[in-house]
Image: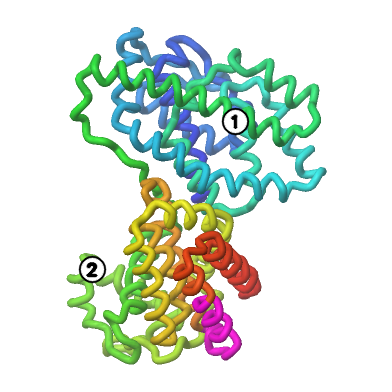
Amino acid sequence: MTDSDKLIYNLVYDYYETRILMGVCLYGEELPSIPKIGETFRMAPRTVRAALSRLEEKGYIEVTARKPARVIYQADEARFRENAAMYFVPRRAGIIDFCGAGLLLVEPVWMYAQSSLDKDTWEKLKKNLSEAWMTDLSVSTRLHLHAFDELQNRLFLNFYWELLRYIRFPYLSRKDMHSERDRELLVDGKENESEIMRVTFEDDFNAGMRKLLMFCARAEEEYGLKEMEPIPFCWNVYWQRPQLCYTLVSRIITVIMKGTYPIGSSLPSLSNMAKQLDVSYRTLRRTLSILGSLGIISCHRGRVAEVCFEIGPIDFGRAEVKEGLRLYRESLQFMALTVRPVLLYTLQNVEKEQRDSLTAGFEEISRQDKCYLCFKLVSDFIVTNCPLATVRECYRVLDEFIVWGYPFVLNRAKRPDLREEYAKVICKAEKSLKKGELESFADTWKNLLEQDLLKANQIV
């Protein structure tokens, strides 16, 4: 099963688990057929079967050959209500936080996705939705999933899927609540359909939020959950295996960037590094091998590795390097689409001291002639200072992926024109911050990310 299959697999499993535990799918009811589920979630039959098998293992459904799966979970209304309370009450603060973060992280990507769809693609998308319009997952939610899929940015689609898995209340809709509206939108058709669907999604979401918050307020008292520890949103990205090596590559590149392992110095011995990072020798050796393929370090048999004075040749044929480059490109696109509203919101909600600290950071990397570190500087500022937890979590992960771009940028930074280009951007950013011209600063940053995305897309 591929990483993409696993993502959809979890989404489908969570969807039906939520509906069963909270009383939308009742004992004895049949789930849609495997082909119908596949149409709704755009997934292969084998992945549908894997999700159904897990639901069966949990005792939620019964799967019989050549028949639709049947719900066998039994509970009364009180138990359904308790199940919902135990899930949503500790996540209430995170879901409320998402309401603000969604405007900064999802809405800009939706606007871009919508504008990127040509007429033929839109008609094809509409046809796919209309063929499966009699489903419990509303057309407004499915439209987002399908449109984001067209972007071919697996990283953002992963983020959106994980958000759905966290908030879950859109899973509780019933087709009799929206089937007539879906038919009107998808079968009969209307002018300016994409805008109508956007408004429809907002209406669905806002209505669901109102019901959820009222339910949580009552359930908190009813079940004595006021002291229940909150469960925040956590973005779990599914890397290719071995997962730990990818994480370690980012961690080691970060400490090299910060000067913990200076350029030209030797890394600690394998035994010391393994102890510091709390990993096995095997995992560390594989990580160092990937760093060697990126040209960051020079590995010598029987000797400790050295941090290169200059980035060496990059092995673009290696699978891990290809994956790192993909994540770098997709994180650049994600940031380019969202960084303007995110930066504006963050800068407008921090104290002057935090803005001055960011300005000082730009001055320092300019003084050190390390303007290529500007991406890390800005993402760290957002992760540290943005009031919205969902934004901080999103940019924390994106920051890790942007780190993978360090060797690619340094490889290009050997060109004097690139150094000059970054220096000009940093100078303009400093001036904008000092003058309090926050929109100009955000625009400068958006433009730089867009330019670097174009260059990243040219890398073999």
The residue shown at (37%, 74%) is: 361
The residue shown at (29%, 72%) is: 284
On the image, numbered disc 1 is attached to which residue? 201
On the image, numbered disc 2 is attached to which residue? 277
Q: Amino acid at mark 2?
A: Leu
Label of residue 357 in the image = none
Q: Position of residue 32 (x, y in %)?
A: 58, 21
For the rendered model, the colour scheme is: rainbow
Toward the viewer: 243 or 121? 121
Can residue 10 be seen by looking at this rendering?
Answer: no
Q: Is 93 on the left or on the right of 372, as rendered?
A: left
Mark 2 to mark 1: distance in Å?
A: 45 Å
Q: Amino acid at mark 1?
A: Phe
Q: Residue furthest front?
A: 435
Q: Secondary structure at mark 1?
A: helix
Q: Position of residue 419 (x, y in %)?
A: 54, 85
Q: Magenta stretch mostly in which secondary structure? A: helix
Specify whether residue 205 is painted magenta: no
Toward the viewer: 340 or 157? 340
Q: Is 151 on the left or on the right of 10, as rendered?
A: right
Q: Position of residue 163 (x, y in %)?
A: 45, 40
